[in-house]
Amino acid sequence: MSGSKIIVVCGSTASGKTALAVDLAKRYDGEVVSADSVAIYKGLDVGSAKPTKEEMLGVKHYMIDVVSPFDEFSVSDYENAALPIVNDILSRGKLPIICGGTGFYINSVLYKMSYGNSKGNAEIRNKYEKIVAEKGNEEAYEILKKVDPVTAEKLHPNDKMRVIRALEIFESSGVRKSDIKDEMTPRFDFIAIMPTYDRETLYNRINKRVDRMFENGLEEEVRGLLKNGLTLGNQSMQGIGYKETAEAILNGSEMPIDTIKLNTRHYAKRQITFFKRFQNLFAVDNSGDGGFEKVCKIADNFLKN
């Protein structure tokens, strides 16, 4: 293996990404960098379906259990933490395998972003940083929704830096960020592998995963997090499964298992739509036998060239 080559394993929840990434790491002397916006949090284990030590099969994993659930963590934070890890893996002659379903995390490592020719404006930026500090991320996000709804749709309210940057661009130039062509300069040579299932099979896998989470103690985990002082205002509690369960506990209602299944299926659909736009994407049917062999042929060809 030569150069700065990376394999990305991406796709929807419950599609078999974790197992595939581990298998690839074992075969190609790789290490796995997680790109999951819930798995980064300590103590959020059951609902994030973090890989167990047994499932890791001795493969080194990064960006799991790295942030307190009381802290916010933006895409920029992920980029600043994960990019040095990827470069370190490469420097040791190993293959970085970025694995996860949070597309903005993955893009932040793969690409250096340049927002047209827009220059920064410290005064405007400081104004919105003050708004966020005093009134929270949602306040700035609501302002962005009014002036640039297209950009707002693409960002999470907690992605503070990019929300403020979009507001800064609009206020300083009068031009919406969504009207500016972003320049995405690849940092690495990469391919993206997306394991897939037909919709019925994927939805069945999602339903079974949610059932398994409750069997494995999701309700008890969320009760413990709330007892420790977390609230629905914390970013970590906004993840699917955690938010609905916390609301049910606080309201004294039944566990919203069917609601979580539905929300997860909707999320999976959005993930698939997002990743289908990825460059160098190979979608591989993960049902039945022969899927891993297909992936290995793709990887062999990529790593040899």
Image: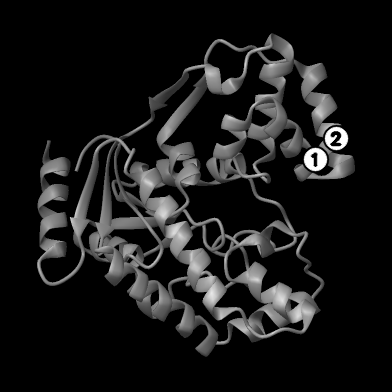
Q: Which residue is mark 2?
A: 131
Label 1 CA crowd tier, 10 Å (few <14, some 14–19, many 20+): some
Q: Is residue 113 above or below residue 195?
A: above
For the residues labelled 2 and 1, the Cα–Cα distance comes to 7 Å
Q: Secondary structure at mark 2?
A: helix
- Could you tell me if the residues under marks 2 and 1 are in contact, i.e. CB atoms within 8 Å? yes
**269 sits left or right of 216 in the view:** left
Q: Nearer the viewer, residue 97 or 240?
A: 240
Q: Is residue 169 above or below residue 223?
A: above
Q: Is residue 287 above or below residue 81?
A: below
Observer able to see residue 47: no
Q: Position of residue 106 (x, y in %)?
A: 44, 44
Q: Quadrant of residue 47?
A: bottom right
Q: Which residue is mark 1?
A: 139
- How many marks on residues? 2
Q: Residue at x 30, y 61 (%)?
A: 21
Label 2 CA crowd tier, 10 Å (few <14, some 14–19, many 20+): some
Q: Is residue 261 above or below residue 6?
A: below
Observer able to see residue 231: yes
Amino acid beneath label 2: Ile
Q: Nearer the viewer, residue 297 or 88?
A: 297
- Which dot, 2 or 1, sits closer to the camera? 1
Q: Secondary structure at mark 1?
A: helix
**211 sits left or right of 220 in the view:** left
First of labels 2, 1 by sequence position: 2
Q: Position of residue 285 (x, y in %)?
A: 18, 60
Q: Nearer the viewer, residue 239 or 2?
A: 239
Q: Quadrant of residue 69?
A: bottom right
Quarter of the image with the C terminus is top left
**35 sits left or right of 299 in the view:** right
Amino acid beneath label 1: Glu
